[in-house]
Amino acid sequence: MAKATFAAGCFWGIEDAFRQVRGVTDATVGYTGGHTVNPTYREVCSDRTGHAEAVEVEFDPQEVSYHELLAAFFHMHDPTQLNRQGPDYGTQYRSAIFFQDAEQEAAARAAKQALQRAGTFKRPIVTEIAAAGPFYRAEEYHQRYFEKNGIRSCHLPSHS
């Protein structure tokens, strides 16, 4: 198994979306990219810890490639919105790819550049690409939130 870490706004929706990708064996919501050790949801929501709401994706590279996960990531949110997704705003809702190694970093940078060059989005892509640091698992009530609350699936944004 391999790991990938993504932030794309509220973590509930992207967790649900990644769980639907063939080859993803697990998705855990949590916090990463900040300076506070073991932050709580309340602390992250204060927009003072530097963390993003993120999803750590465990996947089988024999079934789904990192490139396919990147494509899914860029499809499941609007990577042109700086520090927000829909009604949620603050640095904790930023678009970010937290790479695990040099290969993931190169793939993330190439994917972002290719989408920008292709004009896939009308505005510049603001997705941050940074080395993965500590990933802090969110409180249990956030895990599989949609599943626990009978929400069938997340709404994917329109990029037109």
Image: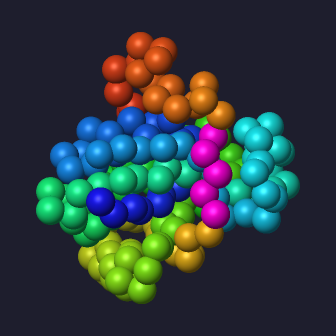
Q: Is residue 145 left or right of residue 61?
A: right
Q: How many marks?
A: 0
Query: Is residue 137 part of the magenta span, yes or no?
Result: yes
Give the x, y percent position of residue 144: 46, 29
Residue interval drawn in magenta:
134-138
Residue 86: quarter of image: top right
Q: Relative to 153, say whether 39 is above or below.
A: below
Q: Residue at x 80, y 37 (%)?
A: 42
In this view, the residue farthest toward the top is: 150
Q: Relative to 31, say whether 102 is above or below.
A: below
In this view, the residue farthest toward the front is: 1
Query: Is residue 28 part of the magenta span, yes or no?
Result: no
- Position of the N terminus, as image quadrant, is bottom left
Q: Is residue 31 left or right of residue 159?
A: right
In this view, the residue farthest toward the left is: 62
Q: Is residue 11 left or right of residue 89?
A: left
Q: Relative to 77, say whether 105 is above or below.
A: below
Give the x, y percent position of residue 146: 45, 24
Q: Nearer the viewer, residue 125 or 68?
A: 68
Residue 108 visible at all: yes
Give the x, y percent position of residue 10: 56, 41
Q: Residue at x 21, y 63 (%)?
A: 61
Residue 124 visible at all: no
Give the x, y percent position of residue 143: 52, 32
Decide whether the magenta segment is chiefly helix, strand or loop: loop
Q: Relative to 86, say whether 31 is above or below.
A: below
Q: Residue at x 29, y 45 (%)?
A: 25
